[in-house]
């Protein structure tokens, strides 16, 4: 499924919320590759349609794994910086917390990035001025 507001992928869904935040929700058990990561960044570019980079909320709940190359691409690529202004990683499970902490500590994101256990706190942070 593809429309102006959102896109379905093999591993999850990405959409533009009414408040201007782009959100990614992974399917249960999703395993992301470098190509999946590139597809999410490309889809985010379509959603913001040439506007300024948008805040990004990534719900890691269903994510089971993410390749090292894919994490590095999200964290360090110029492509990601063109579409995202900051990234909130939402985590509630032990697996997603480990993945989120790995992303933050090993890959050193080039964008402001924080790990949250509560959705409202993540959204509040994404709405704050840079």
Image (spheres, helix red, strand yellow):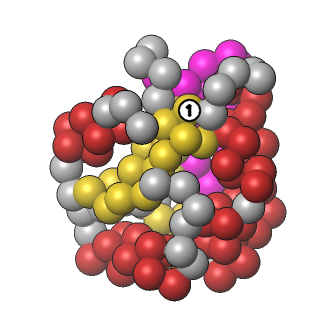
Q: Nearer the viewer, residue 31 or 111?
A: 111
Magenta segment boundaries in residue numbering: 1-17
Q: Residue furthest front?
A: 130
Element on which disc 1 rests: strand
In percent of the image, x 73 and y 61: which residue is there?
77
In percent of the image, x 49 and y 37: which residue is there?
55
Q: Quadrant of residue 16?
A: top right
x and y percentages locating residue 48 in the rendered image: 67, 25
Q: Residues within 10 Å of mark 1 (few under 14, many from 20)?
A: many
Q: Is 12 included in the stretch rendered in magenta?
A: yes
Say left or right for 121 vs 64: left
In percent of the image, x 60 and y 42: which residue is there?
84
**Looking at the image, residue 67 lies above or below residue 6:** below
**Looking at the image, residue 13 lies above or below residue 30:** above
Q: Is 42 included in the stretch rendered in magenta?
A: no
x and y percentages locating residue 20 in the rendered image: 49, 22
x and y percentages locating residue 1 in the rendered image: 70, 28
**Looking at the image, residue 105 lies above or below residue 50:** below
Q: Quadrant of residue 60?
A: bottom left
In percent of the image, x 37 and y 31: which residue is there?
129
Say left or right for 55 vs 41: left
x and y percentages locating residue 5 in the rendered image: 60, 19
**Looking at the image, residue 60 lies above or below residue 105:** above
Residue at image mark 1: 54
Say left or right for 21 vs 125: right
| Residue 58 appears anywhere in the view | no
Say left or right for 51 vs 97: right
Q: How many numbered marks, from 0 up?
A: 1
């Amino acid at each position: 499924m593809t429309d102006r507001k959102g896109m379905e992928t093999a591993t999850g869904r990405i959409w533009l919320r009414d408040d201007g935040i782009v959100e990614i929700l992974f399917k249960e058990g999703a395993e992301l590759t470098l190509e999946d990561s590139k597809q999410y960044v490309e889809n985010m570019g379509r959603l913001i349609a040439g506007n300024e980079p948008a805040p990004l909320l990534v719900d890691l709940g269903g994510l089971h794994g993410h390749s090292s190359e894919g994490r590095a691409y999200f964290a360090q690529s110029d492509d990601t910086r063109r579409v995202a202004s900051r990234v909130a990683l939402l985590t509630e499970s032990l697996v997603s917390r480990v993945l989120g902490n790995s992303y933050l500590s090993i890959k050193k994101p080039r964008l402001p990035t924080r790990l949250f256990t509560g959705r409202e706190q993540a959204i509040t942070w994404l709405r704050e001025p840079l």
